[in-house]
Amino acid sequence: MPWFKRLSEGLSRSRDALQGHLSELMGRGPKVDDEFWTDLEDALIVADMGVMAATEIVSRLRRTASRLALPDAAAVLSHLTAELAAEFEQPTQDLLEGRVTLIMVGVNGTGKTTTVGKLAKQAVDSGRSVLLGSADTFRAAANEQLDVWAKRAGVEVVKRDSGEDPASVAFDTVAAARERAVDITIIDTAGRLHTSVDLMRELQKIQKVTRREADASTTVKTILTMDATTGQNGLVQAREFHAALDLDGVILTKLDGTAKGGIVVAVARELGLPVVMVGVGEGIEDLRPFNPEEFAAALIGSS
Ligand SMILES: Nc1nc2c(ncn2[C@@H]2O[C@H](COP(=O)(O)OP(=O)(O)O)[C@@H](O)[C@H]2O)c(=O)[nH]1
Ligand SMILES: [Mg+2]
């Protein structure tokens, strides 16, 4: 299935919800008055775009409407997709371009390990050399889960027994990657510890070791996976990760499981971080680089 169709299907719950509000808005007639703008803003907020982004999109749309002397509600809404896409900085850089070392972080269950597996497979398919590191030594099953993905992708995993120091795994991984001049190195990490202070400290240690030991020709990036179904709660967690780790980007997973796909807008706007990829399912093909125009078109559909 082509990617846009996948994305579009993945966002269908969000699109249906938003379309419901927009057709209500259209049903009131062609008049564009203050109430129209307020209701449009509310519809965007309900989609979880966040108040800041919703306000900004609506005020830009208002300016466009007056500049182009748009005659009615339908004409105004036909510009919504473009204004939504304009919310994002562009272009988003390809995560797997050049030589990179990625540290994947995020709350348990948000999709770190799955995302590591998908990225590994995609990188291999595009002819890159890949090495994975299993620095989730907290859960016993973590190694096996990553192994399954690694086999699928045909790549090696550096690991240690559970309970061992995750920063040592990062050290071993990066050392091996350096020696073999690997293109793409991805380190999976744990998402749950006794306290979040412990977790952040552990991740900071992994980050420090990785930055210190990684080959000078690779870019080290710390990427947060965020479960889109957790909505605004996920944003709170994301802020905590960002404060502790100075993130380089966010991957939004499980957009297929929510009616509030607008969270992508809130993440970009309120965290000031690029959304580097989006996930719309459990399959390898269901993770792709984020493209603002595509996303806006899939979220809003034709009205
Ligand atoms: N529907 C859906 N499920 C996903 C997506 N990404 C990950 N998952 C599922 O989320 C669950 C937790 O993923 P996992 O990688 O183990 O999370 P981790 O604890 O952060 O490593 C798994 O069942 C994945 O298949 C996605 O984009 N869509
Ligand atoms: Mg995991």
Image (cartoon, rainbow, N blue to C red):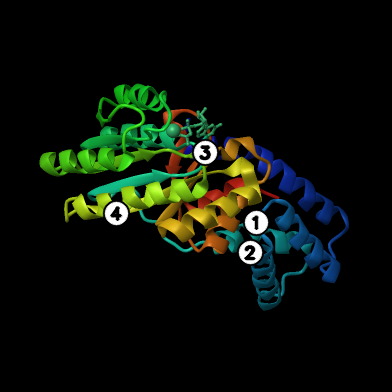
* Inter-mark Cα distance, 3 to 1: 20 Å
Q: Earlier in the sequence, mark 1 or mark 4?
A: 1
Q: Which residue was labeled with disc 4? A: 208
Single out the mark in the foreground, 3 or 4. Answer: 4
Ligand 1 under 8 Å from disc 3 Cβ:
yes
Viewer-proximal residue among 253 and 147? 147
Identity, as a three-letter code, of the amino acid under mark 2: Ala
* Inter-mark Cα distance, 4 to 2: 34 Å
Q: Residue at x 74, y 62 (%)?
A: 41
Q: Which residue was labeled with disc 3? A: 110
Image position of 271 with respect to 133: above or below: below
Q: Which residue was labeled with disc 2? A: 53
Q: Which residue was labeled with disc 1? A: 49
Q: Confirm or deny contact between disc 1 and disc 2 (CB under 8 A).
A: yes
Q: Position of residue 181 (x, y in %)?
A: 13, 43
Q: Earlier in the sequence, mark 3 or mark 1?
A: 1
Single out the mark in the foreground, 3 or 1. Answer: 3
Identity, as a three-letter code, of the amino acid under mark 1: Met
